[in-house]
Amino acid sequence: MENIIHMDEKWFNTTSKYKKYYMLPGENDPHRTVQNKNHIGKVMFLSAEGKPMYDDEGNIFDGKIGVWPFVRKEQAKRRRGRGTQVTKPIKSLTYERISRNLDELIQNVQNEFDNYDPDTLNRVFLTLQGCLVEVMKDGGNKYKIPHIDKDRLQA
């Protein structure tokens, strides 16, 4: 488990089709920049993480390798001013942050990745290791996630 890199992809939508806003009297409705609520922009991200490595003084490697959006930059053809750079998904966190466009979505996901706690990532890898041990014992995917003392294992 020490030398394993975990890679995963995840789709993120720029907004939700059904979004509730609680507004004060006299407050303007938020501006949604999608042309149609059934065609909300989305972006795929690839992230790579490893198990955090520690020494006696503290954290050497926090386990974060990177997060990359699958997008391309191209020249706008109309509406936004010809020749302006726009971000387009290659193929047609977050839930707590509001993104008005693809650039904001990319920045929000990058911020969530940068602020992710290495101790939480280490606990994820400890659980993954426990699950792999259970799979090797019984074979197949009919196993229960083992209850292990992660605090003791992290020390």
Image: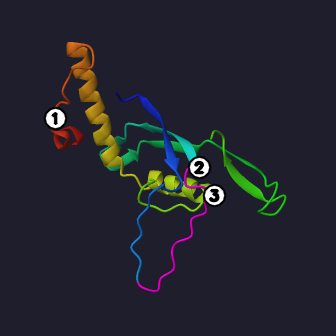
- Seen at 44% across and 31% down, the residue is 5
Circle 1 residues within 10 Å: few <14, some 14–19, many ≥20: few
Which residue is disc 3 drawn over? 35
Give the magenta range: 25-41
The disc label shown at residue 103, or none = none
Residue tagged 2: 39
Q: CA distance from mark 1 to mark 3?
A: 49 Å
| Rendered image: mark on residue 148 | 1
- First in sequence, mark 1 or 2: give its number: 2
Residue 114 vs residue 96, the one in the foreground? 96
| Nearer to us in this view, 97 or 68 | 97
Give the mark toward the camera: 1 or 3.
Answer: 3
Looking at the image, do the residues carrying marks 1 and 3 touch, with CB atoms under 8 Å apart?
no
Q: Earlier in the sequence, mark 1 or mark 3?
A: 3
Residue 35, above or below 153: below
In the visual, does 133 lie left or right of 9? left
The percent position of residue 66, horizontal first and vertical second, equals 52, 43
Instruction: State the scheme by which the image is colored.
Output: rainbow
Q: Tell which tag, 1 or 2, sits nearer the viewer.
A: 2
Q: Distance from label 2 to label 3 (Cα)?
A: 7 Å
Q: Indicate left or right for 149 with 68 as reference.
A: left
Residue drawn where x is 39% and y is 73% of the image: 22
Tell me if residue 44 is in the magenta stretch: no
Q: Amino acid at mark 3?
A: Gln
| Amino acid residing under circle 1 | Ile
Q: Position of residue 141 (x, y in %)?
A: 27, 20
Q: Quadrant of the C terminus?
A: top left
